[in-house]
Image (cartoon, rainbow, N blue to C red):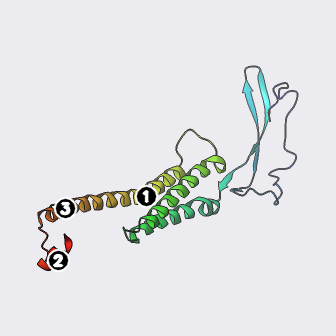
Amino acid sequence: FLSYSFTTDDIVYEWKEKNKTLSESVEIAQFTLKPVSTHQDVSSYVTGNYSVLGLRFEFTRRIGHYLTRVYIPAILIACMSWLSFFIDRKSVPARVALSIMTVLTITTLLIGVGQGSLPVVSYVKAVDCYLIFCYIFVFGAFAEYAIVNSIERGHKSTEHRVNSREITNLRIITPTFLQDHCR
């Protein structure tokens, strides 16, 4: 608080009580409020000296909130996407469903964290980097299956071409008693 109208010759601000604390019932879910500090000072300007009262609020971020809302779910989603490595590569519906579900879930988590629980800033936050790396791991598990499936199809088409050449070179041999019935 600063008086721009009256100099220290006219008015001097003072705190009524030194370091008065706030009510213990005041609580914020994501932060812990440290003890509030007060100060009084005199600011000098061209027009004169003015009385100043200051109040300092210091907050520390509660990590438990972010552990339960962001970090642990992201870890579980990334680990769940890796379960597709243990599913048989021929079980296409199971692997695709698991992969798409984990990609969509981590995308929702990535978008949801930025929407309301954190302040909007112009730089990349550490939680953003963490979630982007989790997204890369989840998408990598999905891409791994696509690559394995593509390679397997390439091998099958090569085998199919070889087998079709062998079949065209085969002669059909039928016993003589069947030749009479087949005509």
- 86 left or right of 62 in image: left
Mark 2 and mark 3: Cα distance apart in space: 26 Å
Give the number of the disc on residue 22: none
Amino acid type at image mark 2: Leu
Q: Horizontal and vertical percent for residue 31?
A: 69, 56
Residues 169 and 150: in front is 169
Which residue position holds label 2? 178
Residues 119 and 102: in front is 102
Q: Secondary structure at mark 1?
A: helix
Whichever of callouts 1 and 3 sits on the residue coming sooner in the sequence is 1
Residue at 82% in and 54% down? 22
Mark 1 and mark 3: Cα distance apart in space: 40 Å
Which quadrant of the figure contains the N terminus?
top right
Residue at 19% in and 69% down? 183
- Asked if disc 1 and disc 2 are in contact, CB closer than 8 Å, the reply is no
> Dot 1 surroundings within 10 Å: few (below 14), some, or many (20 or more)?
some
Q: Horizontal and vertical percent for residue 44?
A: 73, 27
Whichever of callouts 2 and 3 sits on the residue coming sooner in the sequence is 3
Which residue position holds label 3? 164
Residues 13 and 165: in front is 165
Residue at 85% in and 34% down? 12
Amino acid type at image mark 1: Phe
- Asked if disc 2 and disc 3 are in contact, CB closer than 8 Å, the reply is no
Q: Horizontal and vertical percent for residue 36?
A: 75, 51
Mark 1 and mark 2: Cα distance apart in space: 62 Å
Determine which quarter of the picture holds residue 122: top right
Which residue position holds label 1? 137
